Amino acid sequence: MKSYKILTLGASGAGKTVFMASMFRSLSTQGEYGFYLEAEDFNQQRRLNQIYTELIAGGKWPRANIAGNIDEWRFTCCIRNPNLENFPICEFIYFDYAGDRFTRMDKEDYQLQEIIKQADAILGLLDGQKIQALMNNNNEQKIDNFLNEDLPPIIKWMSYCQAPIQFVISKWDLLENDNFGLKEISDHLLKIPEFKELVVNRNKEGSPVRLIPVSSIGSGFATPQPDGSMKKIAGSIPRPFHMGVPVSCVIPDILEKEVQVNLKRLTNINDKNIGEDSILNQFLRATLKFKMLIDITLNFLVSVILDEEKYEEQLLIKFIKEALKKVDDLVFARVQKRLQKNDKQLAELREIRDESILKINDETTALKSAITTFIYISNKLTEDFPDSEIIVDKLKQ
């Protein structure tokens, strides 16, 4: 069973610990997401449940983590078939730490630097309350903190790593209440030169840059206070939003990047030819979105994960040849319009996901079902939020 190390970068107050607790609660059972998480350590499970319970019962937000501590949270991702048989799929290892340590991190902080280098995915947690101030231009201190203290180290350490990256906007309910959309926020962030440079470089590599809105408590549960704290609204009920989406996008993004790197190496394409308009750069995404190619792609991805050693180049070449046999001009035309809404396409993928759960009877079929679920969730994110993948228009660079 493979392990995936996930590091969440974020300043103090961004909501990293609350995010972890709400994610675990949302994925404690196999509901809408089609999989669930089990905490490896019972004490950690109890701690996360306690944090979430205190939050929804009394509106008590957890205290900041102790400076110097780096907590390691281990979750086993599982899937259950209709016969109630449980199958472990993989392990997600989250790293949590004091936000103050991150904003003050320098070249002497070898421990955190080493985790960043070894991470399989990097999540940059952006404080939605500070983004709200930035968009409304109404709180100079919050804006200054976000632009000069919170964001620079996230961008810095993301630019040093090779892992896929996500920007997760916490407290999305606040921005939603002000009617801000991802497009407006993305455009605002791209005005920051360092942010734009990071996105442009990732676009050239063919590695996705996601902007994912989440809310650990949901709309109508709490209101922000003048001192920056949150106060629970009497009688309110938590409605967590998108808490299973970031982790669901991790494996598709890792596999996509790995395939893109090998496609580039095998085809000897120059860097200048790798961009959003490159057919090969969009090839894997196409196969993940179209029913006529999904079986071939899933078999390939499962082979990659199950093979603990580096998979052979011949496996990749075989995948490309088999898929190309089924690809026609219509597919290529659709690739260029991948962000357009297509309810029928998403419905087909959901049908494939549901059918895959019914077929689970061993490790391989369980893994195939899980990957189908992850792909469905990542595609649904794009369907619901077309601007969730940040792509810099070449003409505007």
Image (spheres, rainbow, N blue to C red):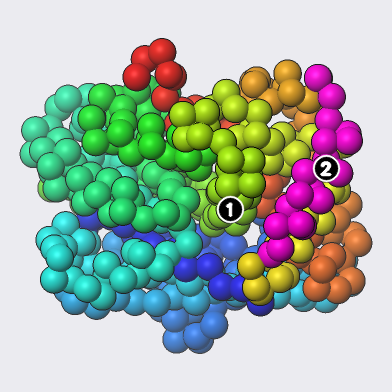
Residue 47 highlighted magenta (yes or no): no
Q: Which residues are magenta?
A: 311-329
- The residue that mark 1 highlights is 258
Residue located at (68% from left, 47% from top): 375
Residue 294 relative to residue 309: left or right: right
Camera-side mark, 2 or 1: 2
Instruction: Return the mark for residue 335.
Output: none
Measured along the vertical axis of the image, is residue 40 above or below residue 186?
below
* Amino acid type assigned to the residue bearing label 1 in the image: Glu
Tell me the crowding category of disc 1: few under 14, some 14 to 19, or many 20 or more residues within 10 angstroms, Cα based. Answer: some
- The residue that mark 2 highlights is 321
Seen from the viewer's position, the closer of residues 213 and 54 is: 213
Residue located at (88% from left, 35% from top): 325
Measured along the vertical axis of the image, is residue 58 above or below residue 280?
below
Seen from the viewer's position, the closer of residues 79 and 233 is: 79
Tell me the crowding category of disc 2: few under 14, some 14 to 19, or many 20 or more residues within 10 angstroms, Cα based. Answer: few
Farthest residue, direction top: 395
**Residue 63 rendering spot, x and y as whole percentages:** 23, 68
Alpha carbons under labels 2 and 1: distance apart = 18 Å
**Residue 290 rendering spot, x and y as whole percentages:** 79, 34
**Residue 288 rendering spot, x and y as whole percentages:** 73, 41
Whichever of callouts 2 and 1 sits on the residue coming sooner in the sequence is: 1
Position of the N terminus, as image quadrant, is bottom right
